Amino acid sequence: MKPSPISTTQQNKAVLVTGAAKRLGREIALEFARQGWDVAVHYGQSEVDARATVEEIHKLGCRAQAFKANLANEAEIKSLFVAVSTQFENLHCLVNSASIFQYDRAHSETPLSSASLQEHMQVNLAAPILLSQLMFEYQKKRVNEVLPSVIQVLDQKLINLNPDYLSYTLSKSALLTSVEILAMDFAPCLRVVGLAPGISLPSGDQTDDGFAKAHQMTPLGKSSAPSDVATAAVFLAQANSITGTTLYVDGGQHLLPSIRDVMFKTN
């Protein structure tokens, strides 16, 4: 049996974090809970990990529930938002963290294909925008002392371009552009901001040693830890005057141009 929604007078502010079962999404979800937010934990396939995240949030004294949805399916995206907003009536923030990150490059043995590009565009671009639109429709009828927000998780490489991960880069670049457009369109009911981490966790077949070296390749001598990104997400959710801009949390990694993705410079 599904739990009944709690009235907004009793309920903490709530956040929906997509891709919250693992990696950065999980860290973001847990940090919101540490700061007293209830959390809707979205997952695609990782049910065991999602339920583990929910249990950790419960231990922190906050409400949490796991919601499964395929972000490549528009009907499931809509059903996800309806289910979340029904169970968490004080939904105040949407963090679009889920993404596909698969290697391709125009001049390589793994060139961009139509199928790969469409898959990245659906999950990394269309899904966040569809959820953002649903969040706007939900919020425009409500009165909030602190303006609710959408946080689009991006990537520092968007202002430090290289040819690696072409489909991923194109999809995230379009999402970056949408931050300003949606912020204008959704004001004054809903803020839209970008959050761009640096290299924070090992990716693909990157070794621990390779990750450690890559993590140090910034002006500050270290890039973002998952906790840095999570803390920044909570800050943006509560920053009433910030909209239409992107916060880079990367130790200055974007200031060091590179012709290859950083993970390939340390293998």
Image (cartoon, rainbow, N blue to C red):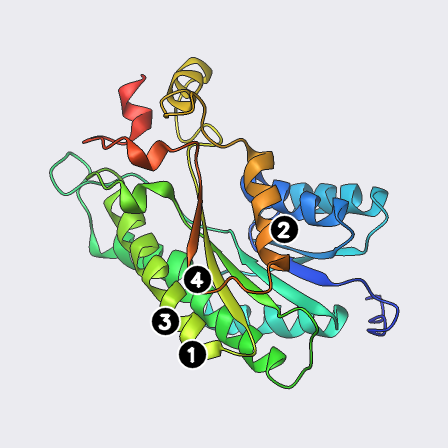
Mark 4 or 3, nearer chain start: 4
Q: Residue tagged by mark 4?
A: 72
Q: Residue at x 51, y 51 (%)?
A: 97
Q: Nearer the viewer, residue 194 or 260?
A: 194
Compared with residue 241, is residue 186 higher up or lower down, i.e. above or below?
below
Image: 208 above or below 154: above
Q: Residues within 10 Å of mark 4 (few under 14, many from 20)?
A: some
The amino acid beneath tag 3 is: Ile
Q: Residue, x 46% and y 17% (percent of image)?
A: 208
Q: Determine whether label 3 and label 1 are within 8 Å by CB.
A: yes
Give residue 183's position: percent from left, percent from top: 44, 71
- Tell me the residue that label 1 is attached to: 185
- Determine which of the numbered discs, if any, sits on residue 69 in the image: none
Q: Does dot 3 land on a helix, a strand or a loop?
A: helix
Are there few (<14), some (14-19), or many (20+) residues within 10 Å of tag 1? few
Q: Is residue 161 left or right of residue 238?
A: left
Q: Residue furthest top?
A: 209
